[in-house]
Image (cartoon, rainbow, N blue to C red):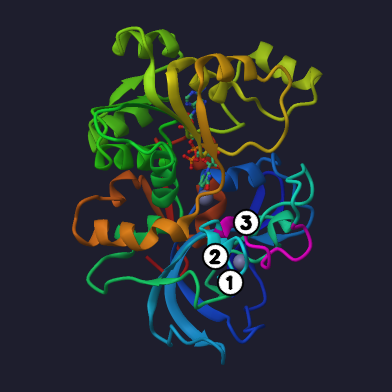
Amino acid sequence: MKAAVFHKPGDISYDTVEDPKIEEGSDVILKVTSTAICGSDLHIYDGGIPQAKDLIMGHEFMGVVEEVGPAVKNLKRGDRVVVPFPIACGHCFFCTHGASPHCENSNHEHYGPNGDLLDQKGGALFGYTDLYGGYSGGQAEYVRVPYADVSPRIVPDNMTDEQVLFLTDIFPTGWSAIDWAQLKGGEVVAIFGSGPVGLMAQKAAWINGASRVIAIDPLDYRLKRAKEVNKVDTINPNKVDPIEAIREMTGGRGADVCVDAVGFEAERNMLEKLKATLNFEKGSSKVLENCFKAVRRGGTVTVVGVYGTPYDNFPVHRMFDKGITIKQGQAPVLNYIDHLIELVKQEKVVLDDIISHKLPLSEVAHAFDIFKNKQDECVKVVLKPHGM
Ligand code: NAD
Ligand code: ZN
Ligand code: ZN
């Protein structure tokens, strides 16, 4: 079959690889009809998260069940499903305590309680490096889905792939960022990053009762998209001080909730890059630190942007003085997906209005280039492995 294969940083190509096979009785093989590139894929693409061996990329995908392992009960050939990105066994301590991204059984080699830089990670993710289980991903014509009775969800026939594809990751991720803050209604929510994840958090904030949603991003074309599709207020941090602007919008107090939907690969100036080099830090925690400044006293900061390394001078003093609540991590997609499918079915939310590009999978190298380098007003790319 054909698939998008990571070889080394900056090098992802459309290659011929071996077809996936049923390996465990609980597997299915999916024929992938649509897949997307995530901001998290960029951490592998640019070397921020290491991967030594070739790897089939992709953790946002959906398709039609092609082959079913003998132990699978809930799916049959021909079922059309979306597949959440964490690989979860469904019966371990974490899977039964609402924390499926920490599954104890899916990541055989690198699982552990420590959460270190290069070992002791949580559960496995599709197409997301050997550290996260080394499973082949779904930017491919076919993909093996383990524990197939646990995570895949059947989607309505009358909905297009594009309408439901983002239930695999970015909508549940944006939803997590807001759910973790437990809005009561009327809150001002400031969302740093207006990429695909930030855009989904904006949608979730409105649905959960925010009175004002503010998007912060240095890219004007992404702020324009946010205004158009989600009717948010916008701040470009390269034009105005975002902390001052948020305080001005909130009577000097700060936002009730700040969301970090950027992570460690935030845009940085030369001085910030120099500091990181001297401290052996990858990227920076500047967006998270901005969240601590911009949130009001007693407010909540949630973090869905990825952080992979420690940072010196982390402002724990500000967290303490302001009494900030913080919650973060990989999105527990399984906790939300059934509710979120209902929202989509009932047309309470539209997800496909963030798509800027639809391309055949054969153009994956170009797709990574424009998404990474923010070219051609790229916001979200959907790839089609079997023709458009
Ligand atoms: P993206 O790269 O398309 O979006 C990031 C956005 O942040 C860009 O629009 C960029 O211009 C903006 N940005 C850069 N510096 C900024 C700054 N200083 N202030 C404000 N905005 C800034 O990626 P994405 O797909 O939207 O993903 C965002 C993050 O979420 C990534 O770190 C990704 O790995 C992570 N993610 C986490 C989960 C999870 O389960 N927690 C799931 C999916 C993605
Ligand atoms: Zn993702
Ligand atoms: Zn488990």
Q: Could you tell me residue 235's position as x and y percent?
A: 36, 18
Q: Is mark 2 within 8 Å of ligand 3?
A: yes
Are circles 2 and 1 on residues that touch, CB within 8 Å?
yes
Q: Which residue is mark 2?
A: 96
Could you say which quadrant of the image residue 102 lies in?
bottom right
Q: Quadrant of ligand 3?
A: bottom right
| Three-letter residue code for mark 1 | His
Residue at (35, 47) in percent of width and height? 355
The answer to whether residue 342 is left or right of residue 122 is left
Q: Judging from the image, what secondary structure is the residue with disc 3 in?
A: helix
Which label was assigned to residue 91? 1
Q: Is mark 3 within 8 Å of ligand 3?
A: yes
Quadrant where the C terminus sits is bottom left
Quadrant where the N terminus sits is bottom right
Q: Could you tell me residue 73's position as x and y percent?
A: 47, 87
User: Which tag is nearer the camera, tag 2 or tag 3?
Assistant: 2
Q: Is residue 109 magenta?
A: yes
| Three-letter residue code for mark 2 | Thr
Which of the pair 19/336 is nearer the observer? 336
Q: Is residue 386 magenta?
A: no
- N-term-proximal mark, 2 vs 3: 2
- N-term-proximal mark, 2 vs 1: 1
Q: Judging from the image, what secondary structure is the residue with disc 1 in?
A: loop
Q: Could you tell me residue 134's position as x and y percent?
A: 71, 62
Magenta-tinted stretch: 100-111
Q: Distance from label 2 to label 1 (Cα)?
A: 6 Å
Answer few, some or many: residues within 10 Å of disc 2's Cα (few below 14, many 20 plus, some between 14 and 19).
few
Q: Could you tell me residue 227's position as x and y percent?
A: 26, 30
Residue at (33, 36) in percent of width and height? 183
Q: Which residue is mark 3?
A: 102
| Three-letter residue code for mark 3 | His
